[in-house]
Image (cartoon, rainbow, N blue to C red):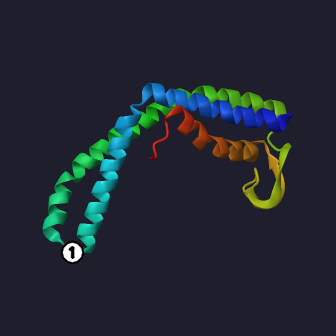
Amino acid sequence: MATLLIAGLAVLVNVVSSLVRKRFTDIEQTKRIQKEVRDFNTELRQAILSKNKEKEAKLKKRQSKMNEMQMKMMSQNMKTSMIFMLPFFGVWWLIVAFFGYETIVAFAPVTLPLLSSGGSLVFSNGLNFFWWYFLSSIAFSGIIMKILGTSLSD
């Protein structure tokens, strides 16, 4: 029961997070900025490696504009994170209080190296609340972002 509830929580959190991102972020603008910055960085790296000082100097003049664009994109992402995180932590606290943090809620088919609550590395196939939520969230996030059109990758 806990296994399905926590996986369902991971799906719900990813859906809500994607919807908040869709509402408060211009996804297409963010994709354009990411592509432009990535292309600029590639071009700058090539100029540095080829020791083309003229091209490097020209690109360095544009670097402050690129940094400004990145900051704008990061502030949009931070805004959506802040809107979403406060309610999420409230729900997280309630669920952990109900199930208990150390309770094993799922079993992995293989032994995994996991960090314990004490900070030490343990090898186990038993997944507590946090690790099961973490793996479930990773498993569903890409799919949900593609379906809702909030994925920043092409």
Which residue occupies the foreground of this view, 88 or 45?
A: 45
The answer to whether residue 135 of the structure is visible from this angle is yes
In the image, farthest residue toward the left: 54
What's the residue type where badge 1 is placed?
Answer: Lys
Toward the viewer: 85 or 55? Answer: 55
Residue found at x 70% / y 43%:
136
In the rendered view, tell whether residue 57 sits above or below residue 77. below
Question: In the rendering, at what x and y percent does residue 140 appear?
Answer: 65, 41
Q: Is residue 77 left or right of residue 103?
A: left
Point 76% across, 53% down: residue: 118
The answer to whether 128 is drawn above or below residue 84 in the figure is below
**Of the pair 138 and 146, the residue shown nearer to us:** 146
Left or right side of 127 for 69: left
Residue drawn where x is 73% and y is 33% of the image: 8
| Mark 1 element type | loop
Label 1 crowding class (10 Å Cα cut-off): few <14, some 14-19, many 20+? few
Residue 83: x and y, percent? 51, 27
Residue 5 quadrant: top right
Residue 133 percent coordinates (x, y): 72, 41
Q: Is residue 85 visible?
A: no
Q: Where is mark 1, residue-wise?
A: 51
Q: Look at the picture and state if 72 lies above or below 108.
A: above
Quick check: 28 left or right of 95? Answer: left
Residue 113 in picture, x, y percent from top left? 75, 61
